[in-house]
């Protein structure tokens, strides 16, 4: 069983969520500034509790269907974001991540995405990792392009968030292309 996970990057550590993370998680998923880029609207405290509880429960399932990890600054335990690989098809995973708005610009998202994608290829044996990003999220598009993801196309009306449908730009990287 692959539990618990603790990954160390250059700037961040990724670890399993704990019930004590709820306030830090709420500061992220309850912030419209952050969720405008995500596939869901801002969430309440009760929804943050459910999210953390669900992540803790799913992390211990056999077989594991996702790696939904808390992002902390290296050497600290406070949660400043999350990163997730969810299995999607044969040896394929979908990457997602978010960082608290007050922590933007520090390289945390890049380091977390790099660390988790490396883990997906090296330890989970995935062949392909994809990321679906809103077309106006230029920072996230630049992040995945820096990591070597290739643009595949546009998923039209892919998510319904903030009262309307939004396209997503699909990116992917294959195991043979990955250069961490």
Image: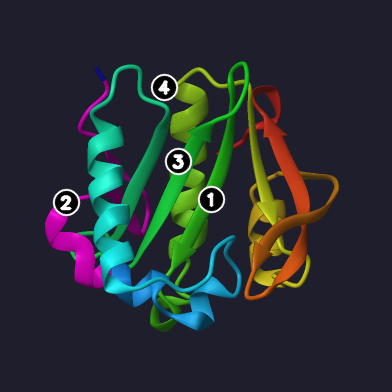
Q: In the displayed structure, would residue 136 be above or below residue 128? A: below
Which of 65/126 is in front?
65
**Image spot of residue 105 (x, y percent):** 50, 77
Camera-near label (3 vs 1) is: 1
Task: Report, in whole angstroms, how far the alpha carbon at label 2 lies from the one at label 4.
Answer: 23 Å
Q: Along the horizontal axis of the image, is 56 left or right of 160?
A: left
Up/down of 118 relative to 8, above or below:
above
Residue tagged by mark 3? Answer: 116
Picture coordinates of residue 37, whole percent (x, y)? 61, 70
In the rendered structure, the answer to whether residue 53 lies left or right of residue 111 reads: left
Tell me the distance, in whole angstroms, between the alpha carbons under discs 1 and 4: 18 Å
Q: Nearer the viewer, mark 2 or mark 4?
A: 2
Q: Does residue 9 lie above or below 5 as drawn? A: below
Neighbourhood count class around disc 1 (C-alpha, 10 Å): few under 14, some 14–19, many 20 upward: many
Decide which of tag 2 and tag 1 comes sooner along the chain. 2
Measured along the vertical axis of the image, is residue 25 above or below residue 96? below
> What residue is shown at x 39% (from left), y 56% (from top)?
82
Task: Specify which label sits upstream in the sequence, 3 or 1.
Answer: 1
Give the residue at mark 2. Answer: 18
Per the image, the residue denoted by label 4 is 123
Residue occupying the point 20% across, 33% down: 4
CA–CA distance in space, label 2 to label 3:
19 Å
Residue count near mark 3 (Cα–Cα under 10 Å), binned few <14, some 14–19, many ≥20? many
**Residue 112 visible (yes or no):** yes
Q: Residue at x 53, y 70 (%)?
A: 41
């Amino acid at each position: 069983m692959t539990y618990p996970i603790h990954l160390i990057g250059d700037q961040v550590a990724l670890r399993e969520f704990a019930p004590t993370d709820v306030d830090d998680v709420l500061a992220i998923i309850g912030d419209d500034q952050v969720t405008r880029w995500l596939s869901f609207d801002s969430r309440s405290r009760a929804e943050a509790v459910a999210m953390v509880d669900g992540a803790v429960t799913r992390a211990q399932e056999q077989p594991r269907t996702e790696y939904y990890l808390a992002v902390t600054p290296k050497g600290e335990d406070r949660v400043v974001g999350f990163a997730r690989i969810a299995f999607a098809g044969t040896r394929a995973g979908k990457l997602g991540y978010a960082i608290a708005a007050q922590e933007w610009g520090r390289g945390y998202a890049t380091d977390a995405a790099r660390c988790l994608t490396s883990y997906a290829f090296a330890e989970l044996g995935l062949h392909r990792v994809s990321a679906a990003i809103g077309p106006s999220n230029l920072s996230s598009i630049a992040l995945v392009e820096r990591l070597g993801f290739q643009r595949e196309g546009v998923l039209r009306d892919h998510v319904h968030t903030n009262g309307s449908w939004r396209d997503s730009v699909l990116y992917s990287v294959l195991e043979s292309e990955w250069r961490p």
